Amino acid sequence: GAGVSQSPSNKVTEKGKDVELRCDPISGHTALYWYRQSLGQGLEFLIYFQGNSAPDKSGLPSDRFSAERTGGSVSTLTIQRTQQEDSAVYLCASSLGGALKDTEAFFGQGTRLTVV
Amino acid sequence: KQEVTQIPAALSVPEGENLVLNCSFTDSAIYNLQWFRQDPGKGLTSLLLIQSSQREQTSGRLNASLDKSSGRSTLYIAASQPGDSATYLCAARGFQKLVFGTGTRLLVSP
């Protein structure tokens, strides 16, 4: 596609339920990133994929958070047993990646998650 | 561990002024530095990318400079307009991720 696409754009869920957030990167981009932005806060790194591998999962806040990427393209971020503190905007970005670590990163519009 | 700081946190100016936004980073081993704009409730829009080997990049009224040795980057906005009002974020690209500053919230008044 023309840009990074995230779905849904908004998600309201009840505390304790599981949610899945989807990211479609720009075609041909091998690097994919997930970030979280809480209200009034900066961007918090969650996880980085190079192809289908996640060499850096250091930012995942707890074992309730997991992410996968299939076919070197679409990625899904799953949050199990959601808590109110999980409420935030979840942003996905992609870049050419691989040996091209110095290339521009492009962000999607984000998924606004509200846990009630 | 890379830390990125942006000063000022907020800036309010009348239309037409030239502005300088500052970004500093603690680890000079970066691949590039990228400036983004974020409008309320929206995602991030890439403005400028400066490679680690470059000193500056320009796009229209925007000019970004990079001094790796001192760990600093500046974003210069010429002849500011109300449409420039947004939060501006800088991000330093390390080996596997971008590390973001907390942003400068800019308001340009007509």
Image (tube, rainbow, N blue to C red):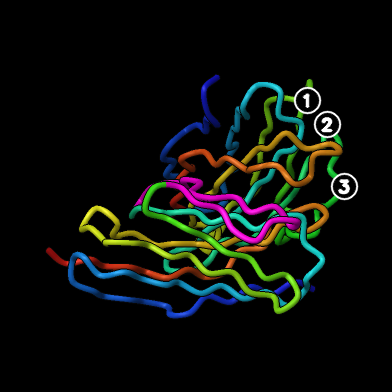
The front one of A83 and B57 is B57
- Dot 1 and dot 2 within a common chain: yes
Q: Quadrant of residue A94?
A: top right
Label 1 near label 3: C-beta < 8 Å? Answer: no
- Dot 3 and dot 1 within a common chain: yes
Q: Which mark is residue A72?
A: 1
Q: Is residue B56 magenta?
A: yes
Please give the name of the residue rendered at 74% of the width and 59% of the height, measured from the top-left corner: A59
Badge 1 element: loop
Please give the name of the residue rendered at 33% of the width and 55% of the height, measured from the top-left corner: B40
Magenta segment range? Answer: B41-59
Q: Which circle's residue, 3 or 1, is located before the other in the chain? A: 3
The three-letter amino acid code for the residue at tag 1 is Gly
The front one of B105 and B57 is B57
Position of A41 relative to B53 (above/below): below
Label 1 lies in what chain?
A
**Residue A49 image position (x, y, % from top left):** 78, 40
Label 1, label 2: how far apart the Cα atoms are: 5 Å
